[in-house]
Image (spheres, grey):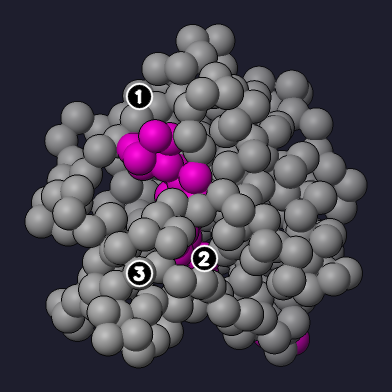
Amino acid sequence: MKASYLQMPAGFDLRALPLVGSTNDVAREEAMKYPPTSVGNVVFWAEAQTGGRGRRGRSWASPEGNLYSSILVQDVGDLATAAQLSFVTAISMRAAISRFTPKNQNVECKWPNDILVDGAKICGILLECGVNKTGQNWVVIGAGANVSHHPSETPYEVAHIKQFNKDIEPYMLLNAYLEEFAQFFQIWKLNGFKEIREIWLQNCYGFGKNIVARLANNLEEHGRFLDMDEEGALILEREDLSRVAITAGDVFLKGCGDAARN
């Protein structure tokens, strides 16, 4: 796995695994151990997964050659605030992927938890949380990125990083991602969400454009992507200029056909 090639940031421990059901599942098991085997943040990295998943229980194809990782953040504090770590992760992974793609490739964060390269999905993020036996809140941050290949049959456009850089390997992306995450995580801990939100908005997909937000109850909201609030909700401005905060759902550019295909 070339685990020896990894340079772990201060305060992070590594658990390198050849094959797991899901790195998030292994991280959750670690989070519930008492006494804990590590007091810091723990990174779980697998070569492949047999049960990878995304939001809403969607399956995530996980063959060898891509990046499958989860970060366990222990004693994270208020869980509502900890949900902001999805955006910390997004800007970290966006910055890491940008290191391995040409400057003319547009690498963007798609609300709420995807990374796109020129509109094609290349990474997904999944947060899960809970409380351990001592009453401390924990968060597991799963991130899966297409490095060497991507699924051939998806209802949306997908890509992998080796399409742009044939020399990249999963451990290289993980090194870059952890370096970026450690920095942005520290900014978030010390200064809160403001700077994270600003960076995310500077690098997000569809900002200022007409979008379709498909909600969990199969309803849709149409309007302009106006902003993201301090809690991470997408602010959509309808045609009548009224505004609605979207807290969960999938976002597509209006008129590009994505909403019809997804």
Distance between the alpha carbons at the discs numbered 3 and 2: 27 Å
**Residues at badges 3 and 2 in contact (C-beta under 8 Å)?**
no
> Residue at 70% of width from left, 33% of height from top?
176
- Looking at marks 1 and 3 on the same chain, the residue that comes earlier in the sequence is marked by 1
Q: Amino acid at mark 2?
A: Leu
Residue at the left extreme of this rendering? 260
Helix, strand or loop under label 3: strand
Front-most of 262 and 136? 262
Residue occupied by mark 3: 224
For residue 145, side relative to residue 224 (left or right): right
Residue occupied by mark 1: 149
Residue 34 lies in quadrant: bottom right
Helix, strand or loop under label 1: loop
> Residue at 74% of width from left, 82% of height from top?
77
**Magenta span of residues:** 108-134
Q: Amino acid at mark 1?
A: His
Residue occupied by mark 2: 127
Instruction: Tell whether position 119 is magenta.
Output: yes
